[in-house]
Amino acid sequence: MKVKTILVSQPEPKMENSPYSRLIEKSKVKVDFRPFIHVEGVAAKIVRQQKIDLNDYTAIILTSRNAVDHFFRIADEMRFKVPDTMKYFCQSEAVAFYLQKYVVYRKRKIYVGKRLFSDLIPMFKKYKDEKFLLPSSDTLKQQVPKTLDELKLNWTRGIFYKTVVSDLSDLRDVYYDILVFFSPSGIESLLKNFPDFEQNNTRIAVFGNSTVKAAADAGLRIDIQAPTPETPSMTMALQKYISDANK
């Protein structure tokens, strides 16, 4: 069956020449973007109930831009002036660059991983005597606490924001040839919004092992999967599938 329409369960990319733009141009398909989940901040009162006092910490572990936003939001709500001596451990360059929204970069102690959380391990070992705060969502990859515990760091997790299912009721009668998912939360949102969802001819594309498992556990047929050695990105996997399907 040919592919004409795709729904990506994420916000539309902000850059003009995104891989999806090239996919649309090359394959002549319609691609829509719609976040199936969104992030909501937790109130400062709830953070206090977690027995978190921002004065107690000398270092912040930041795994995403959301973590950056919500750490500084909570600091502001608690009227906590973040000291210049605070150390920031950022999972990637993108997160570290985003930190400039809140701090003067060159004047701060910022330690940056390449991409994976494990890339920060040498830096954690070097500064193992710090008191670390991990602002996170209500969902957290198991590798993160496992790594911090194995290093025997003095660290605390604070739930500063949560992942919430978006209302997709306006899509009930809209049909797409392919639905694209990047997280188990996206699969959960599909099933919460449409508990009577029947896949039929809809192709399901999934990125990452945890999303594959969530789709399989939900009884969905997985038609497109990434990353693979042949197709390391979702757009490459979609391109390959569409090229075969639309011959």
Image (cartoon, grey):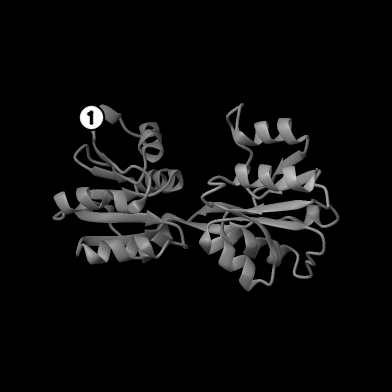
Query: Residue at (27%, 49%) from the top-left corner?
Result: 120
Q: Residue 21: which quarter of the image?
A: top right
Residue 15 visible in the picture: yes
Q: How many marks?
A: 1
Q: Position of residue 68 (x, y in %)?
A: 40, 44
Q: Residue 103: which quarter of the image?
A: top left
Q: Position of residue 240 (x, y in %)?
A: 67, 45
Side (left or right) of 94 relative to 118: right
Side (left or right) of 10 relative to 54: right
Q: Which residue is mark 1?
A: 107
Disc 1: CA contacts within 10 A as few (<14), some (14-19) or many (>=20): few
Query: Residue at (23%, 34%) from the top-left corner?
Result: 108
Considering depth in this image, is 127 or 41 the residue closer to the camera?
127
Q: Quadrant of the C terminus?
A: top right
Residue sticking out furthest to the right: 173
Side (left or right) of 63 relative to 187: left
Q: Position of residue 207 (x, y in %)?
A: 57, 54
Query: Residue at (58%, 29%) from the top-left corner?
Result: 15
Q: Position of residue 133 (x, y in %)?
A: 29, 55
Please say if 201 is above or below 230.
Answer: below
